Amino acid sequence: MLKLTAVSINHRTANVEAREKIYYTSEEIRGIAEKLKTVARESLIVSTCNRTELYFIPSSAPKTHDELYRLIREGKKLKDGELDVQFETFEGFEAVRHLFAVASGIDSLMLGDIQVLGQVKEAYNTGVELGMVGTLMHHICQVALKAGKRVKAETKISEGAVSVSYAAVELAEKIFGSIKGRTAMLIGAGETAELAAKDLKPKEIGRLLIANRTLDHAKNLAAQMGMGEAITLEEMRSRLQEADIVISSVGGSDYILTRDMVAAALKGRESNPLLIIDIGVPRNVDPAVKKIPYVFLNDIDSLQHIVQNNMQMRRTEIVAVQRVLDEELNDFVKWFNSLEVGPTIKMLREKIEQIREEELKRYKGKIDGADARILDEVTRSLVNKILHEPMTNLKSAENGISVVDRVNTLKSLFGLGEESHQEKTNGKN
């Protein structure tokens, strides 16, 4: 039996305010690691902006779900009643499959989230470093990472923009083919602009201009991104001609970009196109700009349409993802069950050998010399032949009987040791 429990506080069970309170940094995991090791044979904490999960293999007596939730709260120094949220629980192989689902992005708030695989890997590395992860959790995490990589390679669950900011970047790539080396201008320095900057940076753009009413906010965003030049909205008008891509997301009722302003910026650019993406509500850009040659203007409605289509495409990939996870879980179950086979065969052979030797001792005084040696050889050969077929069948799962059920039946019939190989193996970690 797989004695693994997972307790999860996630985007389904708690709002963002509660999830922020229960979020664990690497340093906070270090703070709780020693306490966990006193009650857990192995454990793992996975904590992201959308979930905090504890995977727990007890060292002796199992813990209730409430006790595990209390451990998570205490690690954050939260008292009873200070954070009272719902949580999900998973047991045994269900907990294993849940970690596979997390690593694949299929359990994310944003379906197909590609960042979560790296977060699971980071959690695993932290667990290994702190001595929380042993033989079993090591194998579970390795298979989870493998499952996540397979899902990314074999399905389209992570393809297509499912955020407005990334849809803007994806649209830019469709128009320019590649935006490497291009100049991008962000108008605004708020949350939307920050997300757009994060999506632009990996594309290796040449320059980033950040225009904002409050120059300090633009400077802060540039510093945070490690790139970008902060300018005022007044400077933005004169430097618009430098940009290939403009993403605007500011508040206000007046247009930030008018038709005349954009037309003036295009003078001297010949046929070099300008992509303007207006994410503002109300709109930041005069719709008449769309009539200017070589200008591509898209607003939030067109981006939302892209996002919705991509999300629908991702949903159609769920069945393919589930198939990958099922395959990896089946392989894991076989691996886990095989842990019991070798030690069970060894115990059975030792027990039969003990009976054989005891029986031979009864005839020790009656048979000696060559006859004793022949009897030893005959009984040894007889034992091997009797055990051969049962031992072979023990390793298979035919007729709908699982390997673990066969092992447990054999142990019960022959009165073999109750301590499983899993417990022996983990006890040595």
Image (cartoon, rainbow, N blue to C red):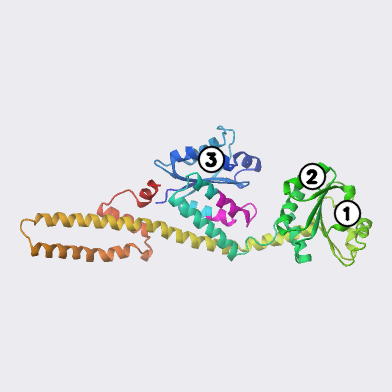
Q: How crowded is mark 3: few (under 14 residues within 10 Å), some or many (20 or more)?
A: some
Q: Give the range drawn in magenta.
A: 100-122
Is 339 left or right of 412, judged from the image as shown? right
The residue where tag 3 is placed is 30
Q: Distance between the residues labelled 2 and 1?
A: 17 Å
Q: Position of residue 249 (x, y in %)?
A: 81, 50
Q: Residue type at mark 2?
A: Lys
Say whether residue 107 is magenta: yes
Tell me the SS state at disc 3: helix
Q: Which mark is residue 239?
A: 1
Q: Distance between the residues labelled 1 and 3?
A: 49 Å
**Viewer can see residue 55:** no
In this picture, is 306 found above or below 21? below
What SS does tag 2 mark?
helix
Query: Which amino acid type is shown beneath numbered disc 1?
Result: Arg
Q: Position of residue 51 (x, y in %)?
A: 59, 46
Q: Earlier in the sequence, mark 2 or mark 1?
A: 2
Which numbered tag is attached to residue 115?
none
- Horizontal relation, residue 74 to residue 365: left or right: right
- Residue pictured at 50% horizontal, 57% vertical: 143
Please tell me whether mark 1 sits on a helix, a strand or a loop: helix
**x 46%, y 54%: residue:** 139
Q: Are marks 2 and 1 in contact (CB under 8 Å)?
A: no
